[in-house]
């Protein structure tokens, strides 16, 4: 499945018990539609929790506001919270990430890297920035 969305907060690298590392980030996918016989536009936002296991070096590029396309395996989790309300969440185990644009707060110098291939371990990110 391919999903395009914006990152809601900077990615975090976490270490699990067996010393493997995983990159956690959250996406929001916004959708707009008009109901039949109505001029009012409705907005629907879907939040997705993502985990990327292949290379932790990509975490520095996954900043709040970045627009990314992920290829993944998605699952749903339903549960009852401590107040007795039924809740649900979506979880993605990401296989690949393509960054379409960066958020406003970026830790690296974009002008320095424009048009270059940036090595991040076994993966490469191709920068297609217009400036």
Image (tube, rainbow, N blue to C red):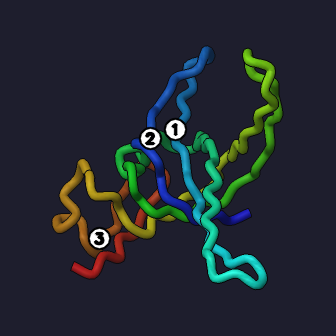
Task: Determine which quarter of the picture holds residue 110.
Answer: bottom left
Q: Along the polypeptide, which appears first: circle 1 or circle 3? A: 1
> Marks 2 and 3, how far apart in space?
23 Å
Q: Along the polypeptide, which appears first: circle 1 or circle 2? A: 2
Crowding around mark 1 (Cα neighbors within 10 Å: few <14, some 14 to 19, many 20+) is many
Q: Residue at x 50, y 43 (%)?
A: 55
Work out which quarter of the rendered image holds the C terminus and state it.
bottom left
Question: Looking at the image, is 64 positioned above or below residue 5?
Answer: above
Crowding around mark 3 (Cα neighbors within 10 Å: few <14, some 14 to 19, many 20+) is few
- Residue 41 image offset from top left, x and y in percent: 61, 74
Task: Determine which quarter of the picture holds residue 96.
Answer: bottom right
Q: Nearer the viewer, mark 1 or mark 2?
A: 2
The answer to whether mark 1 and mark 3 are in CB contact below 8 A is no
71 left or right, relative to 119? right
Q: How many marks?
A: 3
Crowding around mark 2 (Cα neighbors within 10 Å: few <14, some 14 to 19, many 20+) is many
- In the image shown, does 82 or 114 lie closer to the viewer? 82
Q: Which residue is mark 2?
A: 11
Q: Which mark is residue 23?
A: 1
Helix, strand or loop at label 3? It is loop
- In the image shown, does 116 or 63 lie closer to the viewer? 63
Work out which quarter of the rendered image holds the N terminus and state it.
bottom right
- Residue 94 image offset from top left, x and y in percent: 64, 50
Q: Which residue is mark 3?
A: 116
The answer to whether mark 1 and mark 2 are in CB contact below 8 A is yes
């Amino acid at each position: 499945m391919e999903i395009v969305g914006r990152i809601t907060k900077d990615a975090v690298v976490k270490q699990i018990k067996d010393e493997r590392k995983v990159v956690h980030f959250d996406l929001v996918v916004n959708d707009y539609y008009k109901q039949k016989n109505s001029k009012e536009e409705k907005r629907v936002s879907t939040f997705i929790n993502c985990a990327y296991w292949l290379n932790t070096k990509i975490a520095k590029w996954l900043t709040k506001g970045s627009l990314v396309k992920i290829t993944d395996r998605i699952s749903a989790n339903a549960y009852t919270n401590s107040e007795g309300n039924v809740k649900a969440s979506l979880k993605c185990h990401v296989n690949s990430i393509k960054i379409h644009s960066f958020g406003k707060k970026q830790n690296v110098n974009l002008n320095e890297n424009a048009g270059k291939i940036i090595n991040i371990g076994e993966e490469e990110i191709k920068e297609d920035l217009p400036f």
